[in-house]
Amino acid sequence: MSKKVIPCIALLTDFGLQDQYVASMKGVILSINPSVDIIDITHGIQPYRTRQAAYVLWSAYNYFPKDTIFVNVVDPGVGSKRHIIIMKTKKYIFIAPDNGLLDFVLHQEKALTAIEVTQLSLKEFILGNISSTFHGRDLIAPLAAYISNDVPLQRFGKSFTLPEVLSPFATSRTDVVPACILHIDHYGNIITNLQSLEVEKSMKEIQTISIGSNMVAHWIRLYDEAPENTPCLIVGSSGLVEVSAKKNSAAHLLSATLDSKMEVYWR
């Protein structure tokens, strides 16, 4: 008899690591299913930044094993009338507030099932009080744990029609999607929403990117090709155009944040 494979649970939040929030969620999950593996994608999303979270989830999820349950809690609307949704695709299950956090994944994946979670449906599973400020611990963590124990998704709510999602990426001058900064990583690389389907083509088509009042026009293929202290354009591992600086922080050199205005000058 083959051994039952228990799916892992992957966590992505904006909680940071200095407080008790992440540990509380893990404690709830393990109290319900002590055998499940919990993997941290990151807890370093900037507070309330759902688009940044959507990008980070999109860039990581496809490297996880089949049946992984992705728990995503970046939830500026916690306690309001916003929905919590469960989405099942061919390989994975995603749980998140209905605030755009799953939009990047939805652009790439087809949802086979979508459930709007209702507190009435959760009554038989959640016996304690539900805090209005910590649905990650009191609603979403238990949901993930029970799903990992093979409780059918339909037990947690009602069918939900997900909205059609437009591409969050720009690939040419004709795209109507505005260029923007999605993420600034640990090294200070500035990751944009410019998707490079062919590296050489992007290098020929994109002449300059401006971030704030700074212009970046020098293309490189490898980090080590960059001149010292010079922000350069490169296609990163997610197939997106990045601004990087050799052994330095491009974000620091350009005074860039997630809110910095960005424009693309096409050839």
Image (cartoon, rainbow, N blue to C red):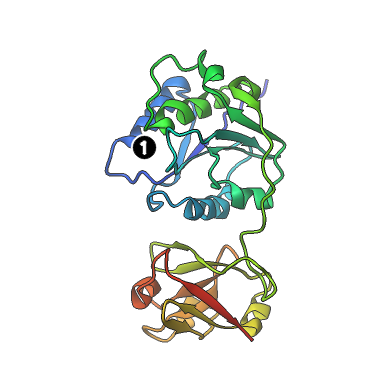
Answer whether residue 3 is visible to the viewer in this image. Answer: no
Answer whether residue 89 is visible to the viewer in this image. Answer: yes
- The residue that appears at 37% across and 26% down in the rendered structure is 131
| Label 1: which secondary element | helix
Task: Out of 236 and 169, give the one closest to the viewer.
Answer: 169
- The residue that appears at 66% across and 33% down in the rendered structure is 160
Task: Out of 139 and 17, give the one closest to the viewer.
Answer: 139
Task: Out of 99 and 186, give the one closest to the viewer.
Answer: 99
Q: Across the whole image, how many numbered discs are drawn on residues?
A: 1
Q: Amino acid at mark 1?
A: Val
Task: Out of 112 and 162, give the one closest to the viewer.
Answer: 162
Using the image, determine if residue 151 lies above or below residue 237.
above
The image shows residue 178 at horizontal and vertical percentages of: 58, 68
The image shows residue 31 at horizontal and vertical percentages of: 41, 21
Position of the C terminus by quadrant: bottom right
Q: Quadrant of residue 148?
A: top right
Question: Mark 1, residues whose alpha carbon is within 10 Å: few (<14), some, or many (≥20)?
Answer: many
- The residue that appears at 38% across and 51% down in the rendered structure is 44
The image shows residue 42 at horizontal and vertical percentages of: 43, 48
Q: Quadrant of residue 200?
A: bottom right
In the drawing, does residue 219 fall left or right of residue 90? left
Using the image, determine if residue 67 lies above or below residue 53.
above
The residue under label 1 is 22
Furthest toward the left, the residue is 18
In the drawing, does residue 236 fall left or right of residue 31? right
Q: Quadrant of residue 213?
A: bottom left
- The residue that appears at 57% across and 62% down in the rendered structure is 238
The image shows residue 90 at horizontal and vertical percentages of: 71, 39
